[in-house]
Amino acid sequence: MAPGKESSFRLNNLAFDTLLQIDDQVNDAPKRMEGKTCDCRCTEEEDRNKPTYCVTDVPPWYLCIILAIQHYLTAFGGIISIPLILSEGLCLQHDSLVQSRLINTIFFVSGLCTLLQVIFGVRLPILQGGTFALLTPAMVMSSMPEWKCPAWTQNASLVNTSSPVFIEVWQSRMQTLQGSIMVASLLQVLVGFSGLIGFLMRFIGPLTIAPTISLIGLSLYDSAGAKISSHWGISAMTTALIILFSQYLRHIPIPVPAYSKAKKLHTSKFYIFQIMPILLGIAVSWLVCHLLTICDVLPSDPAHYGYLARTDVKGNVVEDASWFTLPYPGQWGMPKVSLAGVFGMMAGIICSMAESVGDYHACAKLSGSPPPPKHAINRGIGVEGVGSFLAGAFGTGNGTTSFSENVAALGITKVGSRTVILLSGVFMILMGMLGKIGAIFTTIPTPVLGGMFLIMFGVITATGISNLQSTDMNSSRNIFIFGFSMFTALVIPNWILKNPDFFKTGVKLVDQVVQILLTTHMFVGGFLGCFLDNTIPGTKRERGLLALDKEHLEDSSTTLGTEEIYDLPLCITSCFSSQSWGCYVPFYPWKGNRTQYSSGDNKPQSKWNEDLPNGKGVTEDIYL
């Protein structure tokens, strides 16, 4: 297909036809590029990377709906797994109805926070959802002697979900978790709206972020193992299906009927395996478990191995759940504050902030926007803090953060419109109000969840390690810092959990704070990585601190818009643009601090252009 026709075809069928994959481009490059100069190759590379719809563009309504559902499905696995894991620490593993309400609540709040972030926050097409960075300290809190679930709550035959005693057991833990998240989120609000995030990021480099994120995934191995062991065969099948769909079949399209004015009724390519591999893997395994259940192949005795693979374990939870539910703040009671819990959550909040800043830059690059200015980053972090506060108030048992998976989806669809993300947020709010939907998700068999967790937590671990690609890993300094931080963060929490009475000061509150911090793997690893990285001598290039500056240069050559996309809505920016006090407000887009763009090429007029003839210098170096 000719380049011009290929471009037109993508415009007409953007929902179904993604760009050619990188390996296909490399293999076909000699044939396409024969007889052309390096400049031509660079130009075509830039054209391929440019989004079809930019941040302020509004695609056709049908395309908005399809892509919004795609973003919802992309975030599905990460969002739904948080309340299902958290329910164990809240003694709710045998109360499916409350689990379904937790699922509804986290979807509702995620949609609400997405709207806040896109409208008033960083203003980029970035989805908000639950964060595993706060799940880890929450699980550590639940393992403390003061918060451990009573033994009788582990036995389904002894649990009466309507009993006031049982309700008090789980609600008291949820209320403490809520209060801790709400107080800890105020740190994020302060850091964001005060502009301190820029100062903190001077000390938080890849050697701090890598062990912190990696240890989030590694610390959850016990939860994944417990679910996998309920039926190794079903778990292995789920894992194999997700791997098959996401890795081996992702380049294989499914022909589907489509219609356009130019081509009328025709068939188009739909990369279903690339868009929803986790959902497909869960659905197929879920169906197999259902067939095995109705054929009575799986044991019906709860004491026998394989019983948890049945789809009727949760009883009539779908029938008992209401059709409509409206989550509201304080639905589980008045939040309580635990100082130990607040410190643990603060460690997760700091990790979440560092990760979100990276997501903002990646999202801006993929959506064809200029690098986010300081005021937009400050607002984004501040609004995420507000979102975590709301998540705590509503009772999700978690906070909120930017979803990296959905940022990656922008590179596939080439649609960077924030209208699509706004619509996806509306979908999540609606899903959060449908009680039956949350109840259906609670019936996913335990080994199916285990198979999904094996993939998900492994990817989280690898995502953390991938932050090291900007550092010099041939340096013995960096190898020492990363290796020591990782290994120590596995040893110390494990030993303290086995010897909880070793550290006793006589002050109960101090003992709780120290124990929570030292048993939170990501805090130990992140603290050691940050301390060593900032005290052991090393160059900025060696530490990976120059990578972000290089990305700014690359972004300036592919930018399709101006910094005006980061302005506040509803004419707020224009109404106060003439006020001199705007330059003193860290989150206000004051006109005097704005990078100037020329009307011709939309590139920043700065000293960068002196080193970038025709705006292609960096691109050429990278391509060659």
Image: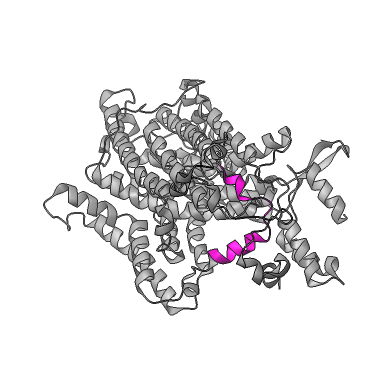
Q: Residue at x 50, y 34 (%)?
A: 112
Relative to 468, say whether 225 is above or below: above
Residue 243 relative to residue 210: left or right:
right
Q: Residue at x 87, y 50 (%)?
A: 5
Q: Quadrant of residue 202?
A: bottom left
Residue 227 appears anywhere in the view: yes
Q: Main secondary structure of the magenta part?
A: helix
Relative to 523, say whether 66 is above or below: above
Relative to 502, say whether 9 is above or below: above
Residue 116, image x, y percentages: 51, 37
Q: Nearer the viewer, residue 97 or 79?
A: 79
Q: Residue at x 62, y 42 (%)?
A: 280
Q: Where's the N terminus, which quadrant?
A: bottom right
Q: Nearer the viewer, residue 362 or 132?
A: 362
Q: Quadrant of residue 615?
A: bottom right
Residue 162 relative to residue 615: left or right:
left
Q: Which residues are magenta?
A: 548-567
Residue 485 relative to residue 621: left or right:
left
Residue 6, image x, y percentages: 83, 51
Q: Nearer the viewer, residue 355 or 453?
A: 355
Q: Nearer the viewer, residue 606 or 385?
A: 606
